[in-house]
Amino acid sequence: MTRRRALQVTAELEKLREENARLKEEVAKEFNAKRYKSNKTPPDDSGSTQGASSPTKKRGGKFGHSGWFRKKPKKIDPVEDVRLAARLRVFCLRRKKFPFLAALSPP
């Protein structure tokens, strides 16, 4: 390849790199504009307050209808108070990985 041709290719390569950088910036701007576009519509300045004057729906069943409740369990398991072994509790408190264990330690 001759020196003249090498200079032409180098100049063309530099021009293409600049164009590529410019196009990347344009794509990034368009992408960010679409990505961070607000979905909210601008407020209407006509002065109407449709949402504030309309009543909200009341919660619960209709007046006079019997309520629906979850069935009570036939058998309730007993509750047992289980303490951690003293060595494990001290280890955990030293490491400060479980700060809630400090409340469980005896006075």
Image (spheres, rainbow, N blue to C red):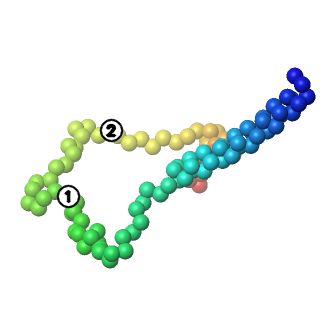
Give whichever of discs 1 and 2 has the lower sequence position: 1
Q: Who's the residue at 82% across and 37% down the image?
A: 11
> 97 above or below 37?
above
Q: Is residue 57 visible?
A: yes
Binning the other alpha carbons within 10 Å of mark 1 as few (below 14), some (14 to 19) or many (20 upward) gives: few
Q: How many numbered tags mark residues here?
A: 2
> 61 above or below 56?
above
> 88 above or below 99?
above
Q: Nearer the viewer, mark 1 or mark 2?
A: 1
Q: Position of residue 16 (x, y in %)?
A: 73, 38
Answer with the quarter of the image where residue 88 lies: top right
Mark 1 lies on residue:
60
- The residue positioned farthest toward the right in the image shown: 3
Q: Tell me if 99 is positioned left or right of 9 in this view.
A: left
Q: Indicate the secondary structure of the residue bearing disc 2.
A: loop
78 or 70: which is nearer to us? 70
Residue 77's disc is 2
Q: Is residue 101 visible?
A: no
Q: Position of residue 87 (x, y in %)?
A: 64, 39
Q: CA distance from mark 1 to mark 2?
A: 31 Å
Binning the other alpha carbons within 10 Å of mark 2 as few (below 14), some (14 to 19) or many (20 upward) gives: few
Q: Amino acid at mark 1?
A: Gly
Mark 1–mark 2 CB contact (< 8 Å): no
> 49 above or below 106?
below
Q: Quadrant of the N terminus?
A: top right
Q: Quadrant of the C terminus?
A: bottom right
